[in-house]
Image (cartoon, rainbow, N blue to C red):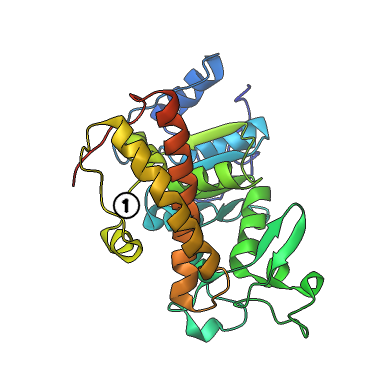
Amino acid sequence: MSLRKGLREMLVPDRFSSLRPEQELVLSRIAQSDAKFVIVQAPTGVGKTLVPVVLQRTVGDQVVYTCSTRDLQDQVLSDFERLSDGSEFAVVLKGRSNYPTYADPRGFPEKNCSTCKYRIRGGRITEHCFMCCVCDDPDVLTDCTGSTACPYLRQRRRASLAPLPVLNMSLLLNLNTHTKFFRKMPWLVIDEAELLEDALMSFVELTMRESWAIRLGIERPKKVTVAESWIEWAENALPLAQDRLKYLREAYGVENVREERWLEETILKMTTFLNELKQDPKSWVFQPD
C-alpha cells in the first residue's frame, strides 16, 4: 500500500488540507504491517476518523466503518458525505426504526421500517410489506413494491455500494449474519473497539423477557446452574414460541410485527442455544438478573 498521494489528489474534502504527524504515523504503520488486525490507540482530537478515509482513497477497496452512536455516524457523514469532486463517499446506515415507511411517512416515528413484513424466502417474495407496498392487488406477491420503495432497504443498498459505509456494530453483526450484505469486507474499521465485546455478547446472548415468559406460561428452570435443566426448558419453550410466531405472522398490527421480529431472533438464538448445550453442557454461562 502506497501513501504517496496527497489529500488533494485523493479528493478528500477541502477542509482537510494536510495530515497531522500522528495520522501519517498511523497510516505508515498500517502500510508496513502484514498483520490481519491493527490496533490504534490515540486520544480524542488526534483525528482518527480521517485515517479510514485516506485508507480507502489509497487502496480503492470498500472500507466499512463502525461506531457506537448515531451522533458519531452523523459526524462522519457531515465530514465525508462527498469527496471534493462531488461524488458520494460516506453513506450512513442505521437501524430500521430510524426510517419512515413509504406508505405513511407522516406516521413516523410511531410507524417506521422496523414494522416491515416484507419477506423473501428461497428467492421468492412470500409476504407483502404493508408499510411500504402500494401495489394494486395485495394477493399478487410479484407486484409487491416493498423492496424498491422501502426507505430502509433503499438505504441499505446505497450503503452496501458506498466506498465508506458507516454503521453501528450491532447492525453490522445482524446484516453479516442474517443477510447477504457485508459478508465480504476487505477492510473493517471499528471505532471505540473497547465496546466490541459488549456488542458481540448482546448479539449472541439469549435473554428471556419476563412478560413474554408469562404470556406463554414458561417458568425459568428450577436448577439454573444445571445444563440438563436448561435443555429441558428450551425443548418445552421452543414449540410454544413457534406457535406464537405462527399466529403473529397472520396479524398486521404494529405491535404484532415488532413482537414477531423479536420472536424470530429469539427462536434462532434458542435453537442455537439448545443444540450447542446438548453438544457441550459447558458452552453457555447462566447470568442471573
User: Does 242 appear above or below 132?
Assistant: above
Q: Residue 214: where, in percent of width, then height?
A: 28, 63
Query: Which quadrant of the figure has residue 277?
Result: top left
Three-letter residue code for mark 1: Met
Of residue 264 and residue 177, the one placed in the foreground of this image is 264
Of residue 87 and residue 285, the one placed in the foreground of this image is 285
Visible residue check, residue 95:
no
Q: Which residue occupies 36% across, 34% down?
A: 193
User: Does 127 appear above or below 23?
Assistant: below
- Would you say 107 lies left or right of 155 here? left
The residue carrying mark 1 is: 208
Q: Report how many numbered discs are placed on residues in the image.
A: 1
Q: Which residue occupies 43% across, 79% down?
A: 110
Q: Residue 220: where, in percent of width, then height?
A: 25, 48
- Would you say 14 lies left or right of 219 here? right
Q: Quadrant of the N terminus?
A: top right
- Would you say 162 lies left or right of 135 here? left
User: Does 88 appear above or below 197?
Assistant: below
Q: Residue 282: where, in percent of width, then height?
A: 33, 24
